[in-house]
Image (tube, rainbow, N blue to C red):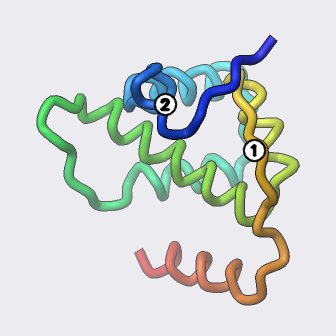
Amino acid sequence: PGVAIRPQDGVSKGWCSASAMHAHLSRLLERNVLKDAELAVLKWGRDFGHESRPGHKGEEHRDASALEALVAYLYLFDSERLHEVLSECGMTFCSKPLNGLVGIETAVMEAMDSL
């Protein structure tokens, strides 16, 4: 059975660290869970320019950023798929998705294309 944790407890319990996100992403890739479009979002999230904090391992930090980008993308555009992907990581969330907001998809796609 799953364990419910509050979002603010995610880091202290090890669910939201760069190392944990790196491990979740590795499992998703090993299991061939992700679709081509999702892999493209991962690449975009991984390549997006940002600085790592001292003590972060570069590879883990980039993978964590990539997975965060994918979760955000799926949250906005395909909440059903987000639940599938999270369940492969042993996670879920309880929230209303933002599907159907006018202009969001276009704005996100334009931002991704401009990078």
Instruction: Look at the numbered disc 2 and give the secondary structure of its residue.
Output: helix
| Location of residue 25 (image quadrant) | top right
| Location of residue 58 (image quadrant) | top left
Residue that sits furthest to the bottom in the current view: 103
Read off the residue under disc 1: 35
Residue that sits furthest to the left in the current view: 54
The N terminus - image quarter: top right
Residue drawn at x 59%, y 54% as measured from the top left: 40
Which residue type does callout 2 highlight? Asp
Residue 64, position in %: x, y? 43, 38
Q: How many marks?
A: 2
Read off the residue under disc 2: 9
Q: Looking at the image, is 115 positioned above or below residue 20? A: below
Neighbour class for label 1 at 10 Å: few (<14), some, many (≥20)? few
Residue 70 relative to residue 55: left or right: right
| Location of residue 48 (image quadrant) | bottom left
Residue that sits furthest to the top in the current view: 1
Mark before the other along the chain sequence, 2 or 1: 2
Residue 15 relative to residue 53: left or right: right
Residue drawn at x 77%, y 88% as measured from the top left: 102
Residue drawn at x 65%, y 60% as measured from the top left: 73
Q: Nearer the viewer, mark 2 or mark 1?
A: 2
Residue 87, position in %: x, y? 77, 28
Residue drawn at x 40%, y 24% as measured from the top left: 12
Instruction: Look at the numbered disc 1 and give the secondary structure of its residue.
Output: loop
Q: Looking at the image, is 95 positioned above or below residue 99? A: above
**Disc marking residue 2:** none
